[in-house]
Image: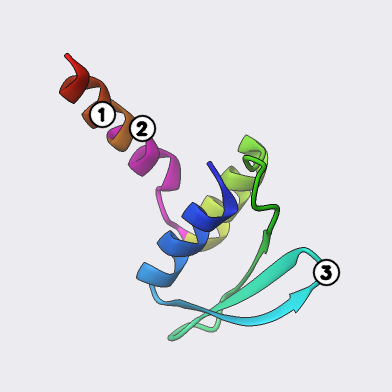
Amino acid sequence: MKSEEIIKILKKNGYYFFNQKGSHMQFKHKVNKNKITVPYHSKQDLNINVIKSIEEHTNLKILKKLNKKKNKINKEEL
């Protein structure tokens, strides 16, 4: 999963961009001001541990959404 996909999910769930240091983008939640840092390397997939960490800090189910999307694509191919 690429950084851009994670960023889209964060924005849909109330996070907004507020800072960047090098290749790391920082987002805050509109309500609870929870801060999340996402490494931004446009051509590389994020490490699974980074995605899990983002899930833990945001209480979002990013990997479940990704698996549902993959299953839907596989069903359409059949």
Residue at the location (53% across, 57% down)? 4
Q: Amino acid at mark 1?
A: Ile
Residue 30 lies, in percent from the top left, at 45, 85
Q: Which quarter of the figure has residue 43?
A: top right
Mark 2 — residue? 67
Give the answer, above or below, for where 12 lies relative to 1: below
Mark 3 — residue? 22
Identify the disc placed on residue 7. Answer: none
Alpha carbon distance from label 1 to label 3? 35 Å
Residue 67 falls within the magenta-colored stretch = yes
Looking at this rendering, what residue extends furthest in the right direction?
Answer: 22
Residue 73 lies, in percent from the top left, at 26, 29
Left/right placement of residue 21 relative to residue 36 reads right
User: Total number of numbered labels?
Assistant: 3
State if disc 1 and disc 2 touch (CB < 8 Å): no
Q: Amino acid at mark 2?
A: Asn
Q: Nearer the viewer, residue 24 or 15?
A: 24
Alpha carbon distance from label 3 to label 2? 30 Å
Residue 53 falls within the magenta-colored stretch = no
Mark 1 — residue? 73
Q: In which quadrant will I find the C terminus? A: top left
Q: Amino acid at mark 3?
A: Gly
Left/right placement of residue 78 relative to residue 60 reads left
From the viewer's perspective, is the residue at label 2 or at label 1 nearer?
Answer: 1
Residue extent of the magenta highlight: 59-68
Q: Secondary structure at mark 2?
A: helix
Q: Residues within 10 Å of mark 1 (few under 14, many from 20)?
A: few
Residue 41 lies, in percent from the top left, at 70, 52
Residue at the location (51% across, 63% down)? 7
Q: Which quarter of the figure has residue 69?
A: top left
